[in-house]
Amino acid sequence: MFLPGHNSTHASGTTFRAYSSTLEKNGQVIPGDDITRKKNDIIIHARRILKLMEKKTIANNRKAFHNYAILEKIEAGIMLTGYEVKSLRKSSANLTDGFVNFKKNEAFLENVHIPPYAQQSTHILDFNSRRSRKVLMHRDEIRKLHDKTREKGLTLVPLEIYFSPKGMAKVMLGLGKGKNTVDKRETLKKRDVEREMRRDR
C-alpha cells in the first residue's frame, strides 16, 4: 500500500508536499486536493491511536515525595468495584494518607479516598470511600516487599493512580524511607531552586 506523501510531509501536518499535484494510482489520476484529504485522514487516525496508547493519570501523591525518600517504584493492579472504576473515570482520588498493609501474604491499599459515583444505585448504602482494596501483584513480589518493610523499616505508599493504555486501573507504589526534619527542609529548598530555574528560562 502506498501512503501519499510518505517521505515528503511537513512536520506541522498542514500541507502535503509532493513532486506534483496529482498521483497516479492503479491507472487513475487522483487530484491534489483528494491527496491532501487522504493524508489528513491518516494524521487524524494516527493521533487517535497515540491517544489510546497514553495512560490517563487520575491522582498523584505529592506529599509522599515530601515525607519519604522513594527508593523503588512498583506498578500494580487494584481490585475495584464497578462503581469505583466509574468514579475514577469521572473524578479524582485522594492518595495523601494512603499506605499498603500486608495480611496473610496479600497486600491491601489502605486509606485511599475514592469518592462515590454520582449515579450509582440508591440501594448501595454501605459505600466506604476509604475501604481496604486488594493490590494485585505476584506473591513472590508481595513477599519481598513485605520483608523490606519489616527488616529495613520502609513504608510502601501509593504515588499515583492511573488507567493504563489498555484501560486497566493501576497504582504506582513507592517503597520509601521516612525523612527527618532536615531532609524535608532540603527537599523544600531543592523544589524552590528548581521553580526559580524554570522561571528564568
Image: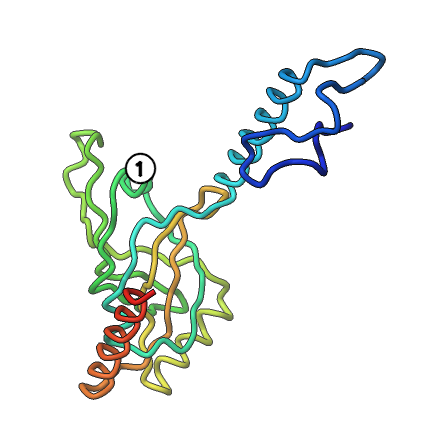
Q: Which residue sits at x=77%, y=28%?
A: 2
Where is residue 147 drawn, in percent x and y? 41, 80
The one nearer the camera, 163 or 142, is 163
For badge 1, the amino acid type reads Lys
The one nearer the camera, 99 or 193, is 193
Where is residue 88 drawn, in percent x and y? 30, 43
Please indicate whether residue 116 sits to the left or right of residue 45 in the image: left
Helix, strand, or loop for circle 1?
helix
Where is residue 78 drawn, in percent x and y? 38, 53
Q: Which residue is mark 1?
A: 86
Where is residue 102 drawn, in percent x and y? 34, 69
Q: Which residue sits at x=54%, y=38%?
A: 12
The quarter of the rendered structure image containing the C terminus is bottom left
Give the colour scheme shown. rainbow
* Looking at the image, residue 169 lies above or below residue 147: above
* Looking at the image, residue 71 lies above or below residue 47: below
Which quadrant of the figure has residue 105? bottom left
Q: Which residue sits at x=29%, y=53%?
A: 59
Tell which residue pokes out farthest to the front in this image. 20
Q: Which residue sits at x=34%, y=58%?
A: 160
Which quadrant of the figure has residue 118? top left
Tell which residue pokes out farthest to the top in this image. 28
The quarter of the rendered structure image containing the N terminus is top right
* Looking at the image, residue 128 lies above or below residue 42: below
* Looking at the image, residue 168 lies above or below residue 95: above
Please indicate whether residue 65 sits to the left or right of residue 143 in the image: left
